[in-house]
Amino acid sequence: HPELSQALGPELFLREIKLAARLQHPHIVSVHDSGQSGAATQHGAPLLWFTMPYIEGESLRQRLTRERQLPVEDALRITREVALALDYAHRHGVIHRDIKPENILLCDGQAMVADFGIGRALGQASAGERLTETGIVVGTPAYMSPEQAGGEREVDARTDIYSLGVVLY
């Protein structure tokens, strides 16, 4: 989204995406590359991008839409796999900030967490004035922890755990 360029600035975006690219875990969708295009958005900022591998399968949201409710065994397995991914990321200093069914991909019976990095980059930007001026919300309200929804500057790994609990529920 072009408004991310204005809110983040290329240095912060690229730094945080590079940090996310270092996360190599079987339940995390890796980041291959990132950069900025020579073309500017309508706001004059460069267009920022990152690439991830194509994951054949579906999102947890798509499966929930189709099935309405998962068998308990599947729900617990998916939650465990996402929790393993989050634990790995948290031990490497990365907080996702937007755990929701749309960011959990299901491939060959395995759960994979997507979109690491952008949530952290947005969170870093929210500590400054620039983000509030753009009106971008960091995270998805239905899955946010109370402290994240309250706009607290510093959220930690517990915000992801809270969001995962909401997804499981």
Image (tube, rainbow, N blue to C red):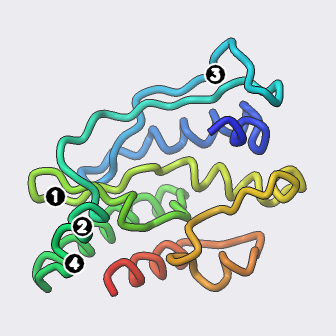
**In terms of image quadrants, where is residue 74?**
bottom left
Amino acid under disc 2: Glu
Q: Where the C terminus falls, by quadrant?
A: bottom left
Of pointers 3 and 1, the one earlier in the residue sequence: 3
The residue indicated by pointer 1 is: 110
Q: Position of residue 6 (x, y in %)?
A: 78, 38
Amino acid under disc 1: Gln
Q: Are marks 2 and 3 in contact (CB under 8 Å)?
A: no
Q: CA distance from mark 4 to mark 3?
A: 40 Å
The residue indicated by pointer 4 is: 68
The residue indicated by pointer 2 is: 81
The answer to whether 151 is drawn above or below residue 37 in the figure is below
98 relative position to 48: left or right = left
Of pointers 1 and 2, the one earlier in the residue sequence: 2
Q: Position of residue 146 (x, y in %)?
A: 63, 85
The answer to whether 74 is drawn above or below residue 20 in the figure is below
The residue indicated by pointer 3 is: 36
Q: CA distance from mark 4 to mark 1?
A: 19 Å
